[in-house]
Amino acid sequence: MDIVTIMLFVLGLALLIAGAESLVRSAARMALGLGISPLVVGLTIVAFGTSSPELAVSIQSALSGPNGADVALGNVVGSNIANVLLILGISAAITPLVVQQQLIRLDVPLMIGISVVVFVMALDGSISRIDGLILFAGIVAYTVFAIRQSRRESSEVQEEYRAEFDADRPQSIGDWLKNVALLIGGLALLVVGSRWMVDGAVGFARMLGVSELVIGLTIVAVGTSLPEIATSIVAALRGERDIAVGNVVGSNIFNLLSVLGLSSIVAPTGISVAPAALNFDIPVMIAVAIACLPIFFTGRLIARWEGWLFLGYYIAYTLYLILAASQHDMLPAFSAVMTLFVLPLTAVTLVFLAWRALRAERRVALP
């Protein structure tokens, strides 16, 4: 295996993470210094910043040509699958996660709806520039709505954001210069890191003899999701269990509307959609989003066993991609077991749990 390709990928990933952290911290402190609400900063700058690796990699991939377009699409779809199955799985395995009512009523249905819209857009074989403009308009509307909703947050929540970014500490001229330098440096690291990571990913695909789509769905997707992974795990360990769930759902919405939208806009001919992505990976992304609803219904809590279930499915999904890419002899048997036994059994279990939870809520509501 080419050591240069591995080093290029790893260094690119390291620069992406460092650049995202620098960008988020500096931009947040500058916004707070201008008098912007800490809660609004958290809903906008921090939310956008933690997904900046996906954005940087997907835009760089979209600009690099047809092969890069597969990496761009695979990065978004794979990140959304990993966010739910891998990140929520790990977080729930650490400690049961609290699910806010707004997630059940608004954000998760919105995530499902946007996923379906992307699938419909992809039916003609590409996400065009017009499609990208529609998606990006969606993130603008969602952000405006989130800011308006934030005004209703409790004083305790606003104080958490204020303490997180040292909002009460006055900023000197030296602080402003430092934040500007960190902001510029963070953007530079994102640009360089994304270029190196995309080049390394394409090199991996050629060495392993698999498609750029598979590399985007696996290695690149998990790599660019590391900020979300770190945020959710730390939140779970600290007992901030609602943040762990909200971070994942918000990141998935941002990936579809902003990352895929902007990538489609800057790509010369839009983002081409490979048949494999249209027939399998995007439907899996939709199924994973839909699976959140019955799990979130069950007592508004993601239990440990549900976290392990998510992790098991992510391992199975990754194994399927590897077997399919290598055309392994085990692929037919593996597919048959998943299709005929595992998936139907899981679906029946989740429907039963959701039905039981709804019955319990109705009993409580009765006088």
Image (spheres, rainbow, N blue to C red):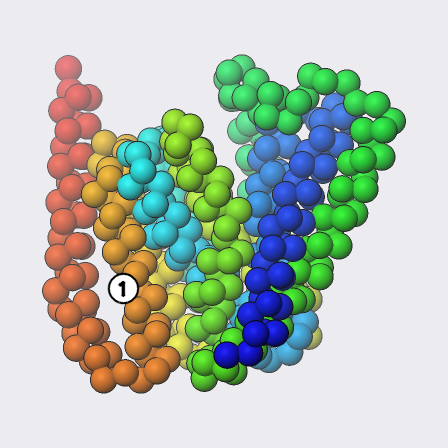
In the displayed structure image, the side of residue 11 where residue 33 appears, left or right? right
> Residue sitting at 55 percent across and 27 percent down?
150
Judged from the image, the secondary structure of the residue bearing numbered disc 1 is: helix
Q: Position of residue 125 (x, y in %)?
A: 49, 77
Kindly identify the amino acid type of the residue bearing the numbered disc 1: Ala
Q: Is residue 66 above or below residue 184?
A: below
Q: Position of residue 291 (x, y in %)?
A: 28, 51
Q: Is residue 219 above or below residue 359?
A: below
Q: How many marks?
A: 1
Q: Quarter-wise, where is residue 183 in the image?
A: top right
Residue behind mark 1: 316
> Residue sitting at 31 percent across and 38 percent down?
94
In the displayed structure image, the side of residue 138 where residue 312 appears, left or right? left
In the displayed structure image, the side of residue 9 where residue 333 appears, left or right? left
Classify 10 Å Cα crowding around label 1: few (below 14), some (14-19), many (20 and above). Answer: some
Q: Position of residue 262 (x, y in %)?
A: 64, 60
99, 213: nearer the viewer: 213
> Residue sitting at 52 percent across and 76 percent down?
204
Q: Position of residue 266 (x, y in %)?
A: 68, 66
Does residue 173 show up?
yes
Q: Quarter-wise, where is residue 345 in the image?
A: bottom left
Q: Is residue 2 above or below residue 53?
A: below
148, 312: nearer the viewer: 312
